[in-house]
Image: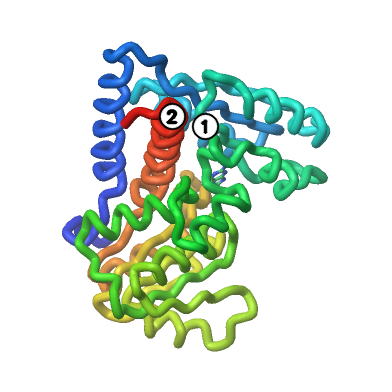
C-alpha cells in the first residue's frame, strides 16, 4: 500500500479541538460569572447504530466543553405526537438552549413535521425552515452544522472562495443546499449536482472546490478531480475490506484523489468532527442569545 502523505490533508480533528477549546473557555467564563451552564436536549428515535454512535460522540463533546446534555430516547414505534409533545416541553424549558433531533427518523415519522416543531430560537442544528430561510436571506441565525463546519475548515486553510468554481454533489437540506448557499454568499460560482445530472465527471472536473455529499462509498474517483482542487468529503461508510476487516470510507476515493487534490479532507477525521463542533457552537450561541450575554 502506498504511504499516505499528510501534507495536503485537512485536519478536521485538530480544527474541531480548537473550536471546542474556545467554546469551553467561553462557557467557563459564563459559569464563573454565576450563570447556569448551557443545556442541549438530544432526541434519538429508534436504534440505528450510526445514529447511536453520532449521539454518543455529541454527548461526550458537550461534556468536554461544559454543556449539559439531556438525552431523550424513543423506541422506533414512537408516534409523531409523542415526539412533538416532548419537543413542546423542551421548547419552553428555561434550562434548555438547544434542541437536536438526530436524523434520519424511522419511517413513517415525518422529518419535516418534527423539525417544524422545534422552537427556532433553540434549533441547534439550524434545520428549522425559519433558520434555513435566514440562511437564504443572509440573516443571522444558527446554521446547519456540517456546512458551517466545512466553511470553518475552508477559512482555517485559507482557501480562496471568491471567484472560484465550486461544485456540490448532493442536494439535501442537511448539506447540499446549505453549503451551496454559503459558498455562493462567499462569491463562488456554484454548481449543484445530483442523481439526474448529466456528464457528472466533466462537471466535477471543472471544480476548484468540490464538496461531495452523495452518500455513496468512493463515488468520486481521482480522475474526476481537477488537479489542485480542494476536495471536501462529507460521506462516511463502514465497509468490509478485502482482508475482512472493517474499513471506513468516504464519498471520494481517497487513495486516487489525494495525489490530484491540493487539499482534501480524510474520512474519518475531516468533516465529521467539525459537524459536532458546530453543534456545540450553535448551542452556546443560542444560550448566550437567550441569556443576553456574550
Ligand atoms: N444525521 C446526520 N447528520 C446529522 C446532523 O448534522 N444533524 C442531525 N440532527 N442528524 C444528522
The residue nearer to you, when weighing 243 against 228, is 228
In terms of sequence position, does the residue under pointer 1 or pointer 2 come before the other?
A: 1
Q: Is residue 113 above or below residue 184?
A: above
Residue named by callout 1:
98
From the top left corner, tell me how far across and down residue 37 is, in percent. 40, 18
Residue 3 seen by the camera = no
Residue name at image x 43 percent, y 75 percent: 167
The reply, left or right, for residue 90 in relation to residue 29 is right
- How many residues crowd mark 2 within 10 Å: few (<14), some (14–19), many (20+)? many
Residue name at image x 52 percent, y 19 percent: 95
Residue named by callout 2:
287
Query: How was the colour assigned to the protein in this rendering?
Result: rainbow
- How many residues crowd mark 1 within 10 Å: few (<14), some (14–19), many (20+)? many
| Eye-nearest disc, 1 or 2 | 2
Q: Quadrant of residue 121?
A: top right
Name the quarter where the N terminus is drawn.
Answer: bottom left
Decide: marks 1, 2 in contact (CB < 8 A)?
Answer: yes
Q: Is residue 286 above or below residue 68?
A: below
Name the quarter where the C terminus is drawn.
Answer: top left
Residue name at image x 79 percent, y 28 percent: 82
The residue nearer to you, when weighing 230 against 179, is 179
Q: Quadrant of residue 261?
A: bottom left
Q: Secondary structure at mark 1?
A: strand
The residue nearer to you, when weighing 14 against 294, is 294
Residue name at image x 43 percent, y 39 percent: 282
Q: Secondary structure at mark 2?
A: helix
* Marks 1 and 2, how far apart at CA: 8 Å
Residue 124 seen by the camera = yes
The picture quadrant for ligand 1 comes to top right
From the top left corner, tell me how far across and down residue 60 is, in percent. 42, 25
Amino acid at each position: 500500500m502506498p504511504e499516505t502523505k499528510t501534507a495536503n490533508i485537512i485536519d478536521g480533528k485538530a480544527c474541531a479541538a480548537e473550536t471546542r477549546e474556545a467554546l469551553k473557555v467561553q462557557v467557563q467564563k459564563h459559569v464563573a460569572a454565576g450563570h447556569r451552564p448551557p443545556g442541549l436536549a438530544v432526541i434519538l428515535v429508534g436504534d440505528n447504530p450510526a445514529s447511536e454512535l453520532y449521539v454518543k460522540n455529541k454527548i461526550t463533546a458537550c461534556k468536554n466543553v461544559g454543556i449539559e446534555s439531556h438525552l431523550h430516547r424513543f423506541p422506533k414505534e414512537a408516534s409523531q405526537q409523542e415526539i412533538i409533545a416532548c419537543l413542546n416541553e423542551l421548547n419552553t424549558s428555561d434550562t434548555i438552549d438547544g434542541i437536536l433531533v438526530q436524523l434520519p427518523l424511522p419511517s413513517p415519522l415525518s422529518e419535516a413535521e418534527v423539525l417544524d416543531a422545534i422552537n427556532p430560537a433553540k434549533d441547534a442544528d439550524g434545520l428549522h425552515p425559519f433558520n434555513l430561510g435566514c440562511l437564504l436571506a443572509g440573516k443571522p441565525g444558527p446554521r446547519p452544522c456540517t456546512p458551517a463546519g466545512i466553511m470553518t475548515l475552508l477559512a482555517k486553510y485559507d482557501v480562496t472562495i471568491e471567484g472560484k468554481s465550486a461544485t456540490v454533489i448532493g442536494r439535501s437540506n442537511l448539506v447540499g443546499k446549505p453549503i451551496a448557499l454559503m459558498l455562493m454568499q462567499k462569491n463562488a460560482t456554484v454548481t449543484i449536482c445530483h442523481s439526474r445530472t448529466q456528464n457528472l465527471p466533466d462537471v466535477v472536473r471543472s471544480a476548484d472546490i468540490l464538496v461531495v455529499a452523495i452518500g455513496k462509498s468512493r463515488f468520486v474517483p481521482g480522475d474526476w478531480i481537477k488537479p489542485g482542487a480542494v476536495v471536501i468529503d462529507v460521506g462516511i461508510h463502514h465497509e468490509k475490506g478485502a482482508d475482512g476487516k472493517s474499513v471506513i470510507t468516504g464519498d471520494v476515493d481517497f487513495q486516487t484523489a489525494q495525489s490530484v487534490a491540493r487539499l482534501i479532507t480524510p474520512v474519518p477525521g475531516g468533516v465529521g468532527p467539525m459537524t459536532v463542533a458546530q453543534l456545540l457552537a450553535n448551542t452556546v450561541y443560542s444560550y448566550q442569545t437567550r441569556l443576553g450575554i456574550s
